Image (cartoon, rainbow, N blue to C red):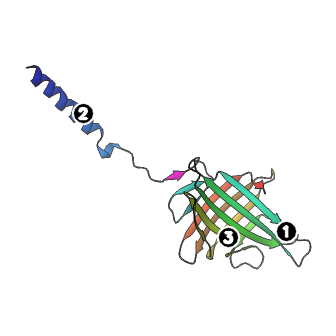
């Protein structure tokens, strides 16, 4: 009789366990994310969202109207394992103008440098990329009154790859 009672308890317990683990009850993860979840991220080909862990700028200002201002913005995601993903944009704009504006690859005044802009990954110590040769797209840059920046971008490469992202916040000068 004891064995029958134990068997009934085991069968009931297993049915309860199987029913509670039904895949229809398990929420699906729609997006894989790496880093802190916020609105500051970049994404490659609509895949993994890489949340910015560091954003930097380097640049030179033109000294006269025959030169262009040139700035490089770098958006980096570094995970706990030390893997690093980076999007870098090099933009130019005319002497005497502010940095805020819309940049593209075919502009005469506010331009994205397609060869110097890139996406690079370092996974387990191996560098993948850089992926360059951008062929179309737009970057919108706005420098806020408090010194912070807002970026949105959507660019495509010659092989069809797409880099999208947005960032709003402080930018560290290198």
Q: How dense is the environment of label 3, judged by Cα within 10 Å: few (below 14), some, or many (20 and up)?
A: many
Q: Residue 159 location, x and y as percent?
A: 54, 77
Residue 54 falls left or right of residue 146: left
Give the image location of residue 93, x and y in percent: 80, 72
As for residue 38 lying within the magenta part, the answer is yes
- The residue lying at 72 percent from left, 62 percent from top is 73
Residue 3 falls left or right of residue 27: left
Cα distance in 3D space between marks 1 and 2: 68 Å
**Quarter location, residue 162:** bottom right
Q: Earlier in the sequence, mark 1 or mark 3?
A: 1
Instruction: Give SS at disc 3.
Output: loop
Q: Secondary structure at mark 1?
A: loop
Question: Mark 1–mark 3 contact, CB under 8 Å?
Answer: no
Pick whichever, 53 or 153, lies toward us.
53
Q: Which callout, 1 or 2, points to the residue nearer the camera?
A: 2
Residue lying at the far top of the rendered structure: 2
Q: Mark 3 highlights which residue?
A: 117
In this view, the mark in front (1 or 3):
3
Q: Which residue is depicted at the point 74% across and 65% down?
A: 72
Q: Where's residue 95, x and y in %?
A: 87, 72
Circle 2 SS class: helix
Q: Which mark is residue 133?
A: none
Q: Magenta region's main secondary structure?
A: loop
Give the magenta part as a residue range: 28-41
Residue occupied by mark 1: 97
Left or right for 54, reference 80? right
As measured in the structure, the alpha-carbon distance from the residue carrying label 3 to the one carrying label 2 is 55 Å
The label on residue 16 is: 2
């Amino acid at each position: 009789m004891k064995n029958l009672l134990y068997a009934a308890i085991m069968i009931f317990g297993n049915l309860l366990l199987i029913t509670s683990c039904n895949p229809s009850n398990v929420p699906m993860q729609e997006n894989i994310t790496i880093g802190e979840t916020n609105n500051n991220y970049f994404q490659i080909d609509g895949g993994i969202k890489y949340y910015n862990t560091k954003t930097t700028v380097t640049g030179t200002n033109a000294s006269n109207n025959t030169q262009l201002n040139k700035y490089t913005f770098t958006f980096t995601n570094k995970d706990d394992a030390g893997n690093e993903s980076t999007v870098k944009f090099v933009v130019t704009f005319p002497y005497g103008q502010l940095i805020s504006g819309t940049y593209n690859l075919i502009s005469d005044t506010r331009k994205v440098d397609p060869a110097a802009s890139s996406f690079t990954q370092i996974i387990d110590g191996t560098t993948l990329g850089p992926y360059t040769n951008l062929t179309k797209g737009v970057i919108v840059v706005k420098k806020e009154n408090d010194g912070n920046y807002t970026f949105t971008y959507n660019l495509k490469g010659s092989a069809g790859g797409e880099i999208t992202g947005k960032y709003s916040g402080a930018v560290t000068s290198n």
